[in-house]
Image: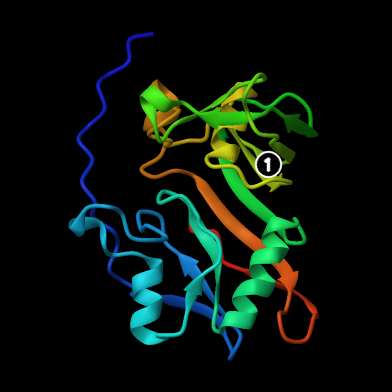
């Protein structure tokens, strides 16, 4: 297959809505991140616009707890005080949270559900891309379940048990079904099939840092 050279990257995040707030109290700020917006500032000055900066312009005390890839949309939680930041950080570190993503992938997935257990590490010559590496990779596990099938694509629900960079994108690629519109890992028809990465963080479940109550937040899938 002949691969066309990648187009030059231009950072042009969506401006409306400025910040889609799903929930806010004195401990939590939950937002719906759009595709194309960074979670935290990039190194270049022109990459300063991000969820963190937008949130802090309205809620100066808000602090990032976790990240989503720039091209991924969906639920993100920020901490509104130091105690909440510690509490939420430990939940992510100890895998006490539960996440469900929606993805449209290329091809007809064989079977209705399964698990991918492939260790990942950075592909240094091609960073920020990641790669499977059984020798030096960190453990990465993703459960998947088919939600619906189209003639050329499949919609799946993805449940990451770990939180490695690009985990869902690389795992689906290695299953033989790249996520549509993935400018890093999809090529040809799979890349051209969508005008954005068809990956969305649909739900996030965690313990409220103040009450300990198990709560779930959801962002409507935009595709």
Q: Is residue 157 above or below residue 177?
A: below
* Label 1 CA crowd tier, 10 Å (few <14, some 14–19, many 20+): few
Q: Nearer the viewer, residue 8 or 165?
A: 165
Identify the residue at image location x=54%, y=36%. Answer: 169
Residue denoted by label 1: 148
Q: Is residue 170 above or below residue 39?
A: above
Residue 152 x %, y %: 55, 27
Q: Is residue 88 above or below residue 105?
A: below
Q: Nearer the viewer, residue 92 or 112?
A: 92
Identify the residue at image location x=39%, y=8%. Answer: 1
What colouring style does the render use?
Answer: rainbow
- Give the residue furthest to the bottom: 26
Q: Is residue 148 above or below residue 60?
A: above
Q: Is residue 25 visible?
A: yes
Quadrant of the rendered image containing residue 17: bottom left
Q: Nearer the viewer, residue 146 or 11?
A: 11
Quadrant of the rendered image containing residue 75: bottom right
Identify the residue at image location x=55%, y=59%. Answer: 221
Q: Is residue 217 visible?
A: no
Q: Secondary structure at mark 1?
A: strand
Residue 134 x %, y %: 67, 20
């Amino acid at each position: 297959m002949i691969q066309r050279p990648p187009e030059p990257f231009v950072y042009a995040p969506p401006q409306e809505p400025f910040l889609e707030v799903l929930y806010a109290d004195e401990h939590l700020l939950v937002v719906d991140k759009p595709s194309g917006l960074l979670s935290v500032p990039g190194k270049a000055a022109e990459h300063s616009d991000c969820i963190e900066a937008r949130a802090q312009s309205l809620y100066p005390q808000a602090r990032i707890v976790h990240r989503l890839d720039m091209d991924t949309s969906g639920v993100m939680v920020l901490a509104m005080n130091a105690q909440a930041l510690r509490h939420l950080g430990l939940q992510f570190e100890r895998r006490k949270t539960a996440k469900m993503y929606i993805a449209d992938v290329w091809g007809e997935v064989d079977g209705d559900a399964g698990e991918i257990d492939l260790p990942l590490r950075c592909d240094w010559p091609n960073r920020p891309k990641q790669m499977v590496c059984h020798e030096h990779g960190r453990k990465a596990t993703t459960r998947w379940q088919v939600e619906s099938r189209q003639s050329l694509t499949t919609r799946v629900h993805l449940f990451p048990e770990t939180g490695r960079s690009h985990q869902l994108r690389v795992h689906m690629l290695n299953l033989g079904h790249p996520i549509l519109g993935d400018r890093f890992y999809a090529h040809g028809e799979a890349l051209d099939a969508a005008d954005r990465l068809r990956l969305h963080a649909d739900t996030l479940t965690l313990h409220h840092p103040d009450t300990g109550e198990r709560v779930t937040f959801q962002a409507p899938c935009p595709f």
